[in-house]
Image (cartoon, rainbow, N blue to C red):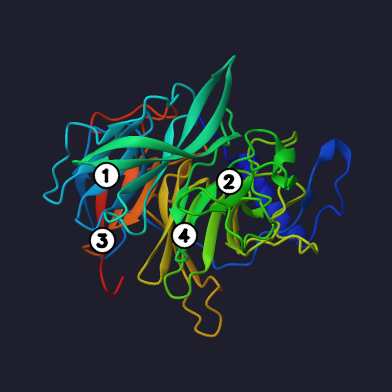
Amino acid sequence: MRNLKPALFSIIALAALGGVLDTAQGQDDRPILGNLPAVPLEIYHLNPPGVTVETVAEGLDVVWSLQFAPDGRLFLTEKAGRIRIVGPDGALDPVPWVTVQSVTAEIRENGLNGLALHPDFPEEPWVYVMYTVDRGGEQVTNRVSRFREVDGRGAEEQIILDDIPGATTHNGGRIKFGPDGMLYIGTGDARDRTRAQNLDNVGGSILRLTPEGEIPADNPWPGNPIWAYGFRNALGIAFRPEDGQLFVADHGPTTEWEPRIGAFDELNIVEKGANYGWPRVVGAPGVAGYVDPILSWIPSVPPGDLIFHNGDLYLTALWSEALIRIRFQDRADPNRVTSVERWFNSRVWRDGVASESLYRRVRALTVGPDGAIYLGTSNRDGRLEPEPFDDRVLRIVVGDDT
């Protein structure tokens, strides 16, 4: 059974101390540890008012990514290697759009992860994916490739970027096209913290490539796919529609070092060429040369995905089993968080576990052509005992006055 007492004690102690707790990396290579960014207290809604939820599809296997095509089809990835289609009529096609044969998905976070459609789809009929490849000898790496749609099915795989560091965990895996038409790729440190500060290694970074897999001339370092670095396991990527600002959610060091320093899962505003600190800084210590997050959590809120919807930012929390709404309602400062709400989760804790969460591990997010939020669950990923209807895609309608 999960026990949050140490983490709860850490947040109380950290709040009491404030500021920077350590002034340098020292014994056992522990990071400079800063306070949590100052934000409003979170509000919990097990059943958020003005919000309705219905099931679109069920009986799926770890829904990792969701995206709608212009014709109303919903593309989704299943961890085991299948891309599936939910038609405009709401029916799940029993035949996969494609099964990626080279995926290895038997262990923890290995598998078929991110998905993105070409910005000009279907005129450019490419569907992009990121997945784990078995290299033999218990070695894995990650790959970004694309499949051409031919007669309604996936064909003609082309590898875009290969040999991205991989491991049983910390594989990253989220891919999104930005408003500039470039492909942004979230990678993890693949259980080697040093990768995140090494510009000669693409682990622990946000990468930026052309749709063809070339390195754009305006990347911060010539010939280098890295756009920003210093991440542990970036799993949420979203662009604010109003100005194209990039937001990235990163997993914090919940399982790193002994004694453990807590979760510190992060939400960051990401700029070209910036360093987000992992593993040299954690939290928001305000150290020159590193960018602090705008949000960070203890206990753990490991992110799964990010989307903007009607001006609000939504983050799925895997271990904390909640959909988190983050609001920016300060017109003078559009980057200031004004409220944080946890949906579909009870705030009441018993023996270190939330007493109730409606959908448990939630991950994939997208916005549909109908203006609703679509959410995919990941309850068959080995962490929980799945329910008979797992995994599901849910349609969430948020009322205008919610």
The Cα atoms of the two marked residues, 2 and 1, are separated by 23 Å
Q: Which residue is mark 2?
A: 251
Residue appearing at x 35%, y 71% in the figure: 310
Residue 357 visible here: no
The Cα atoms of the two marked residues, 3 and 1, are separated by 12 Å
Give the secondary structure at mark 1: strand
**Position of residue 47 measured from the top left corner of the image (x, y, whole percent):** 30, 56
Q: Nearer the viewer, residue 393 or 205?
A: 205
Q: Is residue 305 above or below residue 6?
A: below
Q: Which residue is mark 4?
A: 238
Q: Which residue is mark 1?
A: 393
User: Of marks 3 and 4, which one's residue comes earlier in the chain?
Assistant: 4
**3 or 4: mark nearer the eye:** 4
Report the amino acid beneath label 1.
Answer: Val
Q: Which residue is mark 3?
A: 372
- Quarter of the image for residue 101 reads top left
Residue 182 visible here: yes
- Quarter of the image for residue 292 reads bottom right
Q: Nearer the viewer, residue 162 or 123?
A: 123
Residue 339 lies left or right of residue 226; in this view the side is: left
The Cα atoms of the two marked residues, 3 and 4, are separated by 17 Å
The Cα atoms of the two marked residues, 1 and 4, are separated by 20 Å
Report the amino acid beneath label 2.
Answer: His
Circles 2 and 4: CB atoms closer than 8 Å: no
